Image (cartoon, rainbow, N blue to C red):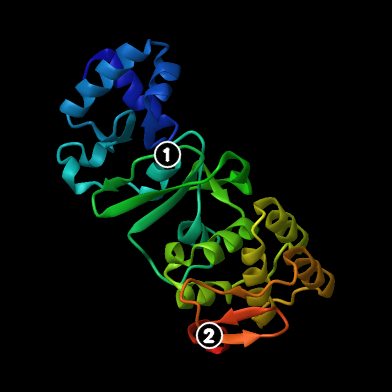
Amino acid sequence: MSNLEQQLYFNLGEKEQRVFTLKDITNILNISLQHARKLASNMVKKNVVERVKPGLFVRIPESVILDKHLYKEDAVLIAARSSEESFLSHYTALSIHGLAERYVTRVYVTTSHHQRDIIYHDVHIKFITVLPNRFFGFKGIKYSNEKVNVSDQERTILDIINRPRYAGGWSEMISCLKNLENVDWNNLLSYIKRLGNKALARRVGYIMDHLENVSIPRKIKEDIKKYSGRNIYYFDSTKKGVFETEWNLIVPQIIQEALHAY
């Protein structure tokens, strides 16, 4: 490696930064973006870094630098650095919060701008685009010595109930929610109103009301009912199930069974 390449390589190593961007290179070396591109390209050719997508790279550790194909970075770190305006979400957020039931080879990222999915080795990094006014409810946490943005617990609850296919389906999603130990109910209610989806509000209320591991406060329960109105909603697109009078919901059998399964 050239002197400049070595400077970048070992600077990243000292900071324990395993995933980096062109912007990181320009900041560390104080060089132009064009120069950073050329430098990164040369380092890829020398097998000291791996390109994940244009502008996003993985630093290959010294211990495996002679055979980079033996090394695979944590895809969560790659997903976290793949877009400036994004946060880890859905089943990935469940895993980070310690609520997930199983390991999956798919990482979910919510972003306010369209992004093309990334295939990194055997992991699929899936981008979910939301409108700018729905880009909220996340926080920065320390993950594997790096800071990543992840949806907080309450936003994660809403996301997986809204799109259960990104959490393994209804049964898997409800099993994960049974691992909840506490909920910031005021935060949850605030997010429900910010999302502005009354059918989702009703589904969230029904599920949280039927979980045995957490107890939804009466006031929150009544506020959700008041906000969601008196219309009758189907729980999902199947439009089949049993009518639950308290929540004005037609609930599929699979959801009722998942809620009462041990």
Q: Nearer the viewer, residue 180 or 83?
A: 83
Image quadrant assignment for residue 204: bottom right
Residue that appears at 53% across and 63% down: 160
Q: Kindly tell me whether residue 21 is visible in this rendering.
A: yes
Q: Kindly tell me whether residue 98 is visible in this rendering.
A: no
On residue 114, the disc is: 1
All told, the count of numbered labels is 2
User: In this picture, is 158 found above or below 127?
Assistant: below
Q: Residues within 10 Å of mark 1 (few under 14, many from 20)?
A: few
Lateral position of residue 22 relative to residue 205, left or right: left
Tell me residue 261's x, y (percent).
Answer: 53, 89
Q: Nearer the viewer, residue 241 or 136?
A: 241
The quarter of the rendered structure image containing the N terminus is top left
Tell me residue 230's x, y (percent).
Answer: 74, 72
Q: Nearer the viewer, residue 175 or 256?
A: 256
Residue that appears at 73% across and 83% down: 246
User: In this picture, is 119 found above or below 219?
Assistant: above
Lateral position of residue 256 relative to residue 181, left or right: left
Residue type (three-letter) at the residue carrying disc 2: Gly
Q: Residues within 10 Å of mark 2 (few under 14, many from 20)?
A: some
Say which label, 1 or 2, has the lower sequence index: 1
Residue that appears at 69% across and 76% down: 214
Do callouts 1 and 2 mark residues in contact (Cβ within 8 Å)?
no
User: In this picture, is 26 found above or below 79?
Assistant: above
Q: Which residue is mark 2?
A: 241
Tell me residue 40's x, y (percent).
Answer: 27, 23
Describe the element under mark 2 as helix, strand or loop: loop
Residue type (three-letter) at the residue carrying disc 1: His
